[in-house]
Image: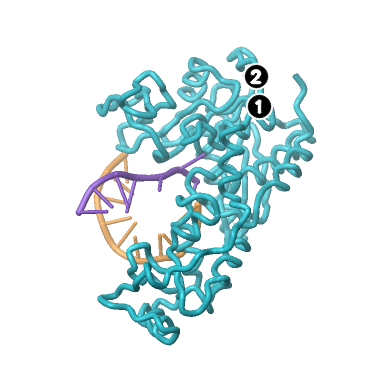
Chain colours: A cyan, B purple, C orange
Amino acid sequence: MPLPDLGQVADSLQQRIPDLGMELQRLVRSIPPGRVVAYGDLANSLGDSVASRWVATYLLLPDGPVAECSHRVVRSTGELGLYYSGDVTEKAVKLTQEGIMARDGRVDLDQFRCELPATAKPLATLKAWQRDFVVPRAKNVELSDVTTIGGLDVSYHGETGVAVCSCFGADGQKLKYHDVKSLPIRFPYISGYLAFRELPVYLELLAEMQANERLPDVLLVDGNGKLHPRRMGIATMLGALVGIATIGIAKSRLCGTLLHEDLKVGTWGPIVASIDEPHEVLGYALLPHGKTKNPLFISEGYAVGEEAMRSLVDRCFAGHRSPEPIYHADRESRRIASTL
DNA sequence: GCGACAG
DNA sequence: ATCTTGTCGC
């Protein structure tokens, strides 16, 4: 089946990615003097409490865009939390000037908490997109058809993301070529929403590769596939959008439980959604070598079967923790980003 | 206090 | 992911 025009795929995806920073600024500026909200209140207004960590770090930006009112955001316990100036007493003084006294380092949320204005709940919309995403029915890749294995990774320099696709031969050991694409990236990292941060650069990169007939037969993606709270990690979405087989390779655990704690080098240890349902395998933990105690977390992305996934990944190791295509893409993207 | 979440 | 000094090991 022919691939879609990836330039168009990239454009239509970019169209659906909200500007969370602008929305958060609007919310924070709506808090009247003399009132407060919790970090989690803001995250919930954006559509997912998991974003509360990003909310906190955003408000901590030195001389950030909401410096004049970020003192009105405190912890859900009433504790003041941190302040962008680095001096929490400054936060306390500003609140006092507005009539909010902190007792034992806490403000009374029952008394001073205010309602936030309605929003479009952008994160709830993205979550629903993941939940309802229809993965096209496709035939799994045949190992005999695999000539090129690509590895994808992104590095950052400020707001610029540098994506690299490193293409190796079917042996998974010999580099054939690599391609690079840089793009400004505004969507933040929020656990579970990585795809909306990194898909745009990947799609632009793959669009160029498509134009030059340099697309690989399968992609190892730095991140998860099925091993995701909504079974829709970046590897799965990317594969479904471009029509290329993908495998998710993460360096730390996003969700799930290792079925058997004892993990031996080179063996694939099943990861299940919950220990109560040991048959719903979301992915695998794999110790690539004895030098590390941290396994990789590998899961099906798109159009790849269990057997092919194991074969393709296993053949790509060469002494590094990551499979060579990803290791090379990581190293190269980081090198380029550091020169910007 | 516990739990703890890709990049 | 990035910020960062020294340190352990092949």
Task: State which mark lies toward you, 1 or 2.
Answer: 2
Q: Which quadrant is the C terminus of chain A positioned in? A: bottom right
Image point (34%, 73%), residue name: A107
> Of helix, strand and loop, which one carries label 2?
loop
| Disc 1/disc 2 C-alpha distance (Å) | 12 Å
Give the answer, above or below, for where A23 lies relative to A86: above
Image point (75%, 33%), residue name: A210
Give the answer, above or below, for where A337 lies relative to A262: below
> Of helix, strand and loop, which one carries label 1?
loop
Residue A277 is situated, as x and y percent measured from the top left of the image, at 35, 22
Q: Amino acid at mark 1?
A: Ile
Q: Quadrant of residue A24?
A: bottom right
Q: Which residue is mark 2?
A: A137
Image point (56%, 58%), residue name: A338
**Would you say A282 lies left or right of A23 here?**
left
Q: Which quadrant is the N terminus of chain A positioned in? A: top right
Q: Nearer the viewer, residue A104 or A6?
A: A104
Please, which chain is the residue tagged with disc 2 on? Answer: A
Query: Does label 1 or label 2 sit earlier along the sequence?
Result: 2
Q: Which residue is mark 1?
A: A244
